[in-house]
Image (tube, rainbow, N blue to C red):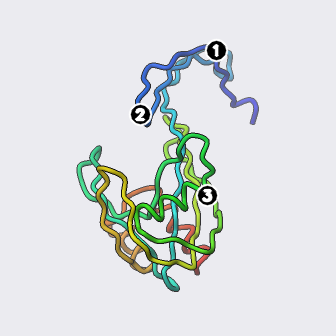
Amino acid sequence: MESLNEERIDGARVYEGKLLKIDCDRIRLPDGSESWREFVRHPGAAIVIAETRPGVLVMERQFRYPVGRVFIELPAGKLDSDEDPIVCAQRELLEETGYSATEWRHLGTMHTCIGYSDERIEIFLARGLTLGAQQLDEGEFLEVFEMSLDEAEQAVLDGRITDAKTITGLFWARKVLG
């Protein structure tokens, strides 16, 4: 596998925003030639498969500006600076949905767009839910609802759910929830 590795020669940050950073690096390819890689640096995120009762999940509807439409998603959010992913998952579940959980299990990691981003999303299962009040961030608007795992899988197949992190989360949900 080492014969496939690319090595950074030099590079520069070409953009730095509140959320994303974009780097452009000159690299050495496995055959010794040189090329360029442009990519997004992302702080990472956590997604939560929150089961309210057997086979029923907490879902959200949220407008996503870059794509210009409302999406059905599992609760998720980005990591704050140096934040532990489980802390992020717990915070986001409470903020977005009002739920807290007594049982947490890390299921895995997904990488969203490996061709141009280093973003990773940690996937968690939350059980033993208690509903409280949402604590949405300023400017955050979403609708919380429940959906069975079977219906969510059907929504992937018929195109109602197209969000990659949610699809990956549902794959894990089927594996651990049956």
Please indicate whether residue 161 sits to the left or right of residue 164 in the image: left
Report crowding for label 3: few under 14, some 14 to 19, many 20 or more residues within 10 A (C-alpha).
Answer: many
In the rendering, which numbered label is found on residue 86? 3
Query: Residue extending furthest left?
Result: 68
Q: Amino acid at mark 2?
A: Lys
Vertical arrangement, residue 19 with respect to residue 71, above or below: above
User: First in sequence: mark 3 or mark 1?
Assistant: 1
Instruction: Give the structural element (helix, strand or loop) at label 1.
Output: strand
User: First in sequence: mark 2 or mark 3?
Assistant: 2
In the rendering, which numbered label is found on residue 44? none
How far from the left and from the top, in percent, is residue 76?
Answer: 46, 57
Q: Amino acid at mark 1?
A: Ile
Q: CA distance from mark 3 to mark 1?
A: 35 Å
In the rendering, which numbered label is found on residue 18? 2
| Mark 1 lies on residue | 9
Q: Residue at x 54, y 55 (%)?
A: 46
Q: CA distance from mark 2 to mark 3?
A: 22 Å
Instruction: Give the structural element (helix, strand or loop) at label 3.
Output: helix
Please indicate whether residue 77 sits to the left or right of residue 122 in the image: left
Report crowding for label 2: few under 14, some 14 to 19, many 20 or more residues within 10 A (C-alpha).
Answer: few
User: Mark 3 or 1, which is nearer the eye?
Assistant: 3
Q: 4 or 77, which is in the foreground?
A: 77
Vertical arrangement, residue 120 with respect to residue 146, above or below: above
Q: Residue at x 64, y 14 (%)?
A: 9
Q: Amino acid at mark 3?
A: Ile
Q: 139 or 149, which is in the foreground?
A: 139
